[in-house]
Amino acid sequence: MTVTNSTDLITAEQISKHFPLPDGKGEFTVLSDVSLSVKSGEVVALLGRSGSGKSTLLRIMAGLIPPSQGQVLSNGKPLRGANTDVAMVFQSFALLPWLTVQENVELGLEARGVKREERRQRALKAIDIVGLDGFESAYPKELSGGMKQRVGFARAFVLEPQVLFMDEPFSALDVLTSENLRGEIDDLWNAKAFPSKSILIVTHNIEEAVFLADRVVILGSNPGVIRGEVVIDLPRPHDRSSPRFASFVDYIYTVMTNPEIEVTGKVVAKTAPAAVLSPYAKALPHARVGGISGLLELIVDQGTIDIPRLSERLQLAVDDLLPILDAAVLLGFAEVSQGDVQIKEIGRDFATTTILRSKDLFRQQALAHVPVLNSIVETLRGKRSGSMRADFFLDLWDEHFPHPEAERQFATAVDWGRYAELFEYDASENRLYLPEVTADLENTENQGS
Amino acid sequence: MKTFPTPEVLRRFPFGLADIAVILGTLALLALIAQLGAGTLVSFEPPNIVPTVDLDPRNLPYYAGRSTLRMFIALFFSTVFTLVYGYLAAYSPRAERVMIPLLDILQSVPVLGFLSITVTGFIALFPGSLLGLEAASIFAIFTSQVWNMTFSFYQSLRTVPKELIEAATLYQLSSWQRFTQLELPSAMIGLLWNAMMSFGGGWFFVAASEAISVLNQEYTLPGIGSYVAAAIGDENLSALGWALLTIAIVIVVVDQLFWRPLIAWSDKFRMEQSAAAEAPESWVYDLLQAARIPRMLGKLITPGKETLNQFLSKLTPPPATFKPDPSQNRRGDRFFNTILVMIIGGLIAWALHFISTTVGIGEVFIAFGLGILTLLRVTVLLLLATVIWTPIGVAIGFNPKLARALQPVVQFLASFPANFIFPFATLFFIRSNISIEWGSILLMALGAQWYILFNSIAGARSIPTDLREMADDIGLKGWQRWKKLIIPGIFSAWVTGGVTASGGAWNASIVSEIVTWGSTTLTATGLGTYIAEATSAGDWPRITLGISMMSLFVVGINRLLWRRLYQLAEAKYHL
């Protein structure tokens, strides 16, 4: 039993969350034995790759979904429904398009039964704080993305919550707008004028986490566990140009690209991943072959490149970049160490040679390093017709992943398998085939012409 | 198309012309309703005192008013029903399992076949007054409108964006606030469009339900439908012409004064977070916006509205996010399912018993055979309508200017009650000796074909311009162009049109397989005639059998054909 500190505002105690898999095939674990507390006066960032359950954890702490095991304490009391100490800023803004800015901001107050005149005054104040004076009677569709998210902030501010929750609040905005809004929120916090006591922000942007947070909690994937936390002991506001800022960012990149490393600092919990038996249990990183070879072509000149710089050069969010890197590493085309990515000889070959040869190289690497592709080919060879219904394979994935993820795994495997000419997929018949012998193909082509 | 001064112009007047127009309009509307409403309460004692219809065209505005009033009363009940039924179905998983399949079946049941049952029931409910007949007619219109609306509302409730629901939960909106601020607004556009389309379809049933002979008895309500019926009996062509003109005017007026403003208003409930390219326009809506009186009234009632909202919010606490243990639910579910299966089994057994003890099982095969004949007619109709209207629809759809101009015309044609044209067609069949066996296909098509045209236009408009340019560029022509670009492009729209047209045609078969002109009656062999004859003879077993058989046909074809085509459209031809 965790003893709750008097300054703890919201505490998650040994939270686990399972979702049932389709057809009663057991459960998929999103979060496993996660404990986290938010103290008064701090900004905590939850950082993790997609699939780490960071948004699920946020929603459990907000009382939007119940945990499977464990409990959430809010102000010392166990949570039984929506958390009234919390207000949330959503990634997609979640504004009601048929209400004006003012009406959207007043919504939460109205629900609490606040009288009309007081509602109006408080809403105007909140709108003023986020700098939307003069837009009170505008409808959301008249506003730009950045201004919409300002309304989202005002709607949360007006309730003066104990903790402000943010679910990737800047990721739907363009680079300049998000930079601007992030800076303003940070200024507001540093000026001690913030309408809440603490902030909990979910993000996949490492620089954003280091810039805003006092503490970055890093989540690991499949199932989601807390790998550890990094305390950002920089003077506020965090200066991006300081060398220590850069070393924090580098360190976190290193940790995130190496799921095996232990996160130094106060490590909260660490569970060993379950032994992998089936080739279908190991998740393929969702990267297209085109993406992988594009990335390799980009780094082929340098040989080695810093991941944060790569991310910046490509204008790609970490969530989008990491799967491609993972795929390149999995296939043995590149190596990652100390926040750097380094291309291997075979990767260099793959990136620079002709299309036919690169297909050969890809097939060789895929068969050597991706057991699931091997398994599919074996299954198809075992059939006299050399073909199999796609559902058969989907069912195998279904045993390890929720159905949407199983479908994505299937799509990725098909993309790789098709490129490597290991098998073919007919979407209308929903079947996988071994490719026909090339000689046959050439014959029919000759006859056709 | 602006036919009226813009709001800016109207605002220049201090207490503007707009206000005067609004006051006068409101007064006129109230007077009209009072006048029409009084008529529904006159005494009526069948079979001695039955209201008669006067064929003098000067009475037509009054008759049209009575019919329109019926339409609006039915619309009101449809809306109330939709909100309650859709809400329950969307939020109770158990209720959903019964209510949605039931809705599916009710949608396919021929409304006209029901008239016999409802007329007798409602007359017994209001003895000695026209209210019974009035209610039966309104009920017929109601059943023609309500299912579409309910389905659309249910679908909208199921597709409210997840983050909006989360925001509503986190900000502790009461169930009442959720309903008025989140659920109803997000369903509004779909609900209004469906209501408007169903309302258009309702005119057909007004005409069919005002004058009806049930159980060997003639029932007549004052209204435009009974006017047409009387004109047919009288072989009075000029009266028919006047009725045609009147109904056309009424449809246009209702569209301009009621639906256009509502559609223009509902544009603010659009989910897209960016401004729409072309917002719907309505001069009545502009007028109401320009006038001060509506806004002043709005301000006056704000405190009252506020108190009412607070009160209702207190009554309806926010729904719980933490659901009770599912294992307990499961046992309840099993019990619930058992009861359900027993009820369905009991109903089937009862129907079979009823039919076998009265008309015998052999009659079932006769009805089935007649059903096949009607099915053939519906199929021929769909094929012909497709061959004729799809090319025209595509040509219109590829020309944006023409499409914009013709869209309201096609919408008008779709809501124009085809049974007003029937007498002219009947006369034509008699004069030119065309057999009704074939002619009834044309009659059914008079109403149903427009859905094919309407959707072909919409489908063609949805084909992206660059695809068409690509087709031009690589020189796709003629049949190649149709096969590779147009047919796949409009396929899902065509399926939507086809399913609506087929449903409409089945329903119309009851009035189009048997038609009269004066003393001549033309009768085609088919399930529609079977039901119509059983209804006027008051033959309960055959009514039951006929309606069940037709419902079975419609549901079966929906499941076996349309649903599959729809899935194909979704999976393969989705643009």
Image (tube, coloured by chain):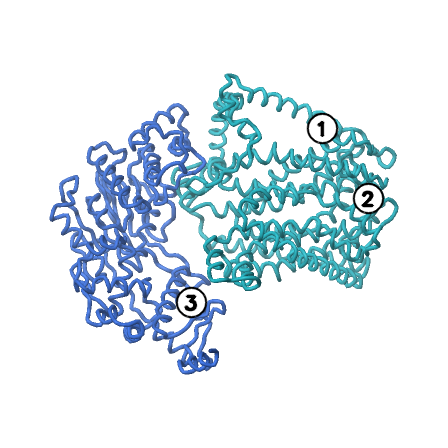
Chain colours: A blue, B cyan
Does the image show residue B278?
A: yes
Kindly identify which residue carries mark 3.
A394
The picture places residue B332, in percent across and down from the top left corner, at: 53, 53
In this rendering, position of residue A84 left or right of residue B304: left
Q: Nearer the viewer, residue B101 or B266?
A: B266
User: Mark 3 belongs to which amino acid?
Assistant: Leu
Kindly identify which residue carries mark 1.
B37
Does the image show residue B542?
A: no
Q: Secondary structure at mark 1?
A: helix
Residue that protrudes farthest toward the left in the picture: A243
Circle 3 packing at 10 Å, graded few (<14), some (14-19), many (20+), is some
User: Mark 2 belongs to which amino acid?
Assistant: Ser
Q: Tell me which corner region of the image, top left, top right, bottom left or bottom right, holds residue A331.
A: bottom left
Q: Secondary structure at mark 2?
A: strand
The picture places residue B123, in percent across and down from the top left corner, at: 78, 38
The picture places residue B53, in percent across and down from the top left corner, at: 82, 34
Circle 1 packing at 10 Å, graded few (<14), some (14-19), many (20+), is some
User: Of the residues under marks 2 and 1, which one precedes in the sequence?
Assistant: 1
Circles 2 and 1 in contact, beta carbons < 8 Å = no
Q: Residue at x 38, y 71 (%)?
A: A418
The picture places residue A392, in percent across and down from the top left corner, at: 44, 71
Give a yes or no on whether discs 2 and 1 share a subunit.
Answer: yes
Q: CA distance from mark 2 to mark 1?
A: 24 Å
Kindly identify which residue carries mark 2.
B213
Q: Disc 2 sits on a residue from what chain?
A: B
Q: Nearer the viewer, residue B186 or B477?
A: B477
Picture quarter with the N terminus of chain B = top right
Q: Nearer the viewer, residue B194 or B336?
A: B194
